[in-house]
Image: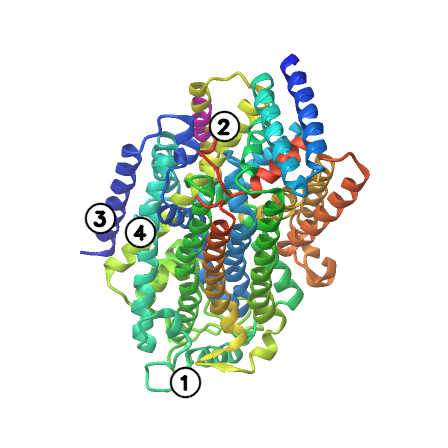
């Protein structure tokens, strides 16, 4: 416990120091985040050695946030990730619930080879689209990981 | 050689292969037992997951159900594939990054609560047991028909095989055995489908074949003929179906969400080395599933046309029973086809209605489960194809059983013992407990295989509904909301499960006579109610979260860690 408090105190002192110094500079935000992450990491390491609760492994993942250049980067990565996910899920909904169920009667008026189109979506088309969606997701996410330097 | 000897040969060869792989890949550590040491290549993992997913129900029953339900059968096709999109986009990569073995691990750690963990363990065990009971029965049915042993012996043989590779091999053995099983089952599914497609439409691909014109010179589309026959015989049009739109919508959604929440599917994505591999592994899984699932509706419509033509005759006046083809006699012996010559003309005739109802002209009752197994016989394919289908059915049933057993044994040894009751247990003891749990589970499932409860089919719907109403929302909120706390998640899971279970139990077991669209909530059948359960879960969780304490900071950092794909490392136990 002693080590834990030491690090805590150390952390707050460092934090105050950096805020004081950096507030004079314009890039202050970047510095504070960096340092706060570093000290958080130190706390995590200590915590890991002194208690065995379930989060230690993840607190250790605090260092993984360092893989992003800054917290803004991490946030930007996450929102791009969500936007991509959302777009793909809209297509997912449209081909299955839309074409295959809600608008099936309208689409069934259309002939697609020997199939009624709505019926084809329900028993074939939706499935092909699902496969394509996951492959698009895989390639876009790989590109996103590279862009933010979190690829492996 | 006859069908019997071919079946012995092909099934025997495939078994030798599975057991060989299980011995070659014996697990040495708990890590290898649970997640194959995180070292399985994505394509292999995709194949194994596909085999794990495609159960005896998919292999044997699905095409049969579609064959009888037409458009309505599409709920299974879309539901059981669309769930993988949710899994790949919203769950799998994050759970892999989380880096533990099991779903209860995630729930327990993310919601910093042993109560949440225990609720999750109970759900996982229940969901897996409902599945496994049906699987052992499937093995028994296939054995009893093709090896001409009684169903009990069939179940016992299956038990011994499953014991070998699930209990001794663990996840590593299972993964590579499942790769072999996938190859066997996909080959067994495609060969007869391609044969029949060539015969009926001249198309090599069944997927295009069932939308093509018939090769008999009539120049009509196969589906048009099927619609015509259906209307003529008093059924709903094949391409239109008879379920209400809201029910089709709800069932599809419940199956999709349930698929994404099934513990034995989720756990598969822990076996690849990196988060990146998880994504691509999910993509391959769906490719391998889609190969079978796009063939199934083709098989369904071919089988339907063939069956009606064979029984009612080309001119639609019925075929004399004395001249019935061999397959009718074969299956009549198993009790899955029944003929009742109501008008006494010695001819069989198939139409809508019950065979004991004097108002209906129907004289033949056909169990939908035989469609895939009987299909090669109906189309008069060579004996080795029929034997191959038997081997495929057994592969499908065994691979799923093994995967489920693993989840049950992990839930007991790892989640319940190691993480909850007895944290100081050694690695070796834990492995021992896992194997013991698997053995007990095999025993119980064999019991249900021999003495099936009358409601196996209903219980499967129960499992999907429960997964949809419990795991899926809890995991989604755990990843996408840092604010969601333990009070919210637990309240959500319990109310979601409670609502869904109460609805299903009421209509399936308490008052089955009331199970009709007029009495359903919003016109949604018990099969589809899981989706409402999911909404209840989300709603209750959101309200309770607002009223209770903020999530601790460590947990918020943990969520940040999960969202960053880098540095997953191996899956850890502690």
Q: Main secondary structure of the magenta part?
A: helix
Q: Chain of mark 3?
A: B
Q: Nearer the viewer, mark 4 or mark 1?
A: 4
Percent position (x, y) of residue B81? 50, 57
Percent position (x, y) of residue A21? 69, 32
User: Quick one: label 4, few (<14), some, or many (20+) residues within 10 Å?
Assistant: many
What is the secondary structure assignment of the residue under circle 3? helix
Residue B184 is labelled as: 4
Q: Identify the residue at the far bottom of this view.
A: B218
What is the secondary structure assignment of the residue under circle 4? helix
In this view, the residue in front, B439 or B421, is: B421
Q: Nearer the viewer, mark 1 or mark 2?
A: 2
Are the residues under badges 1 and 2 in a single subunit?
Answer: yes
Tell me the distance, in whole angstroms, between the alpha carbons under discs 3 and 4: 14 Å
Percent position (x, y) of residue B569? 45, 35
User: Quick one: label 1, few (<14), some, or many (20+) residues within 10 Å?
Assistant: some
Residue B220 is labelled as: 1
Are the residues under badges 3 and 4 in a single subunit?
Answer: yes
Residue found at x 67% / y 41%: A29
In this view, the residue in front, B166 or B171, is: B171
Q: How many marks?
A: 4
Magenta residues (range)? B432-439
Q: Chain of mark 2?
A: B
According to the picture, the residue beneath numbered tag 3 turns out to be: B9
Are the residues under badges 3 and 2 in a single subunit?
Answer: yes
Residue found at x 62% / y 74%: A103
Vertical side of B454 occupied by B322: above or below: below
According to the picture, the residue beneath numbered tag 2 turns out to be: B573
Tell me the distance, in whole angstroms, between the alpha carbons under discs 3 and 2: 43 Å
């Amino acid at each position: 416990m002693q080590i834990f408090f030491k690090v805590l105190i150390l952390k707050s002192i460092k934090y105050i120091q950096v805020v004081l110094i950096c507030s004079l500079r314009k890039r202050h935000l970047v510095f504070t985040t960096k340092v706060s992450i570093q000290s958080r990491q130190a706390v995590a390491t200590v915590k890991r050695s002194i208690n065995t609760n379930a989060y230690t492994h993840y607190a250790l993942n605090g260092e993984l946030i360092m893989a992003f250049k800054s917290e803004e980067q991490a946030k930007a990565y996450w929102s791009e990730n969500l936007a991509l996910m959302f777009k793909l899920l809209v297509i997912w909904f449209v081909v299955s619930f839309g074409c295959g169920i809600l608008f099936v009667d309208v689409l069934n008026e259309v002939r697609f080879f020997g199939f009624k189109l709505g019926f084809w979506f329900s028993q074939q088309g939706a499935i092909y689209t699902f496969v394509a969606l996951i492959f698009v997701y895989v390639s876009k996410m790989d590109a996103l990981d590279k862009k933010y330097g979190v690829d492996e | 050689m006859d069908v019997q000897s071919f079946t012995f040969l092909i099934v025997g060869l495939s078994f030798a292969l599975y057991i060989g792989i299980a011995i070659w890949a014996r697990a040495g550590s708990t890590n290898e037992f649970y997640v194959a040491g995180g070292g399985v290549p994505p394509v292999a993992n995709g194949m194994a997951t596909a085999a794990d997913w495609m159960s005896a129900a998919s292999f044997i029953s699905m095409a049969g159900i579609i064959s009888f339900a037409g458009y309505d059968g599409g709920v299974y096709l879309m539901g059981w594939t669309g769930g993988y999109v949710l899994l790949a986009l919203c769950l799998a990569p994050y759970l892999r990054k989380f880096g533990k073995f099991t779903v209860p691990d995630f729930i327990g750690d993310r919601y910093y609560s042993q109560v949440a963990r225990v609720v999750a363990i109970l759900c996982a065990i229940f969901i897996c047991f409902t599945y496994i009971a049906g699987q052992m029965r499937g093995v028994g049915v296939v054995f009893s028909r093709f090896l001409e042993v009684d169903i009990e012996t069939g179940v016992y043989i299956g038990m011994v095989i499953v014991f070998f590779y699930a209990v001794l091999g663990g996840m590593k053995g299972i993964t590579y055995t499942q790769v072999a099983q996938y190859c066997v089952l996909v080959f067994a599914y495609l060969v007869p489908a391609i044969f029949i497609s060539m015969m009926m439409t001249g198309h090599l691909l069944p997927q295009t074949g069932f939308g093509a014109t018939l090769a008999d010179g009539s120049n009509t589309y196969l589906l048009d003929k099927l619609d015509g026959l259906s209307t003529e015989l008093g059924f709903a049009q094949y391409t239109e179906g008879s379920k209400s739109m809201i029910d089709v919508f709800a069932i599809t959604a419940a199956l999709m969400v349930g698929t994404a929440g099934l513990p034995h599917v989720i756990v598969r994505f822990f076996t690849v080395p990196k988060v990146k591999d998880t994504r691509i592994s999910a993509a391959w899984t769906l490719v391998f599933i889609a190969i079978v699932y796009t063939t199934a509706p083709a098989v369904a419509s071919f089988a339907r046309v063939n069956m009606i033509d064979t029984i009612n005759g080309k001119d639609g006046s019925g075929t004399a029973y004395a001249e019935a083809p061999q397959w009718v006699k074969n299956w009549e012996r198993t009790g899955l086809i029944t003929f009742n010559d109501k008008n006494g003309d010695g001819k069989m005739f198939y139409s809508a209605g019950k065979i004991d109802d004097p108002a209906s002209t129907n004289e033949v009752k056909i169990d939908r489960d035989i469609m895939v197994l009987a299909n090669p016989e109906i189309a008069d394919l060579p004996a080795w194809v029929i034997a191959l289908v038997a081997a495929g059915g057994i592969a499908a049933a065994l691979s799923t059983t093994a995967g489920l057993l693993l989840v049950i044994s992990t839930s007991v040894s790892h989640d319940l013992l190691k993480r909850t009751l007895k944290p100081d247990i050694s690695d070796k003891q834990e492995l021992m407990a896992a194997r013991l749990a698997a053995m007990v589970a095999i025993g119980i499932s064999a019991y249900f295989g021999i003495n099936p409860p009358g409601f196996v089919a209903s219980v499967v719907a129960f499992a999907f509904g429960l997964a949809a109403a419990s795991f899926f929302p809890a995991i989604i909120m755990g990843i996408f909301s840092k604010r969601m706390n333990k009070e919210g998640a637990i309240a959500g899971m319990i109310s979601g499960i409670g609502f869904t279970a109460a609805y299903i139990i009421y209509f399936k077991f308490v008052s089955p006579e009331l199970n009709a669209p007029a009495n359903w909530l919003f016109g949604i059948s018990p099969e589809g109610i899981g989706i409402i359960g999911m909404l209840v879960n989300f709603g209750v969780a959101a309200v309770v979260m607002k009223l209770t304490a903020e999530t601790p900071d460590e947990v918020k950092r943990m969520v940040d860690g999960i969202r960053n794909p880098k540095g997953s490392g191996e899956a850890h136990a502690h």
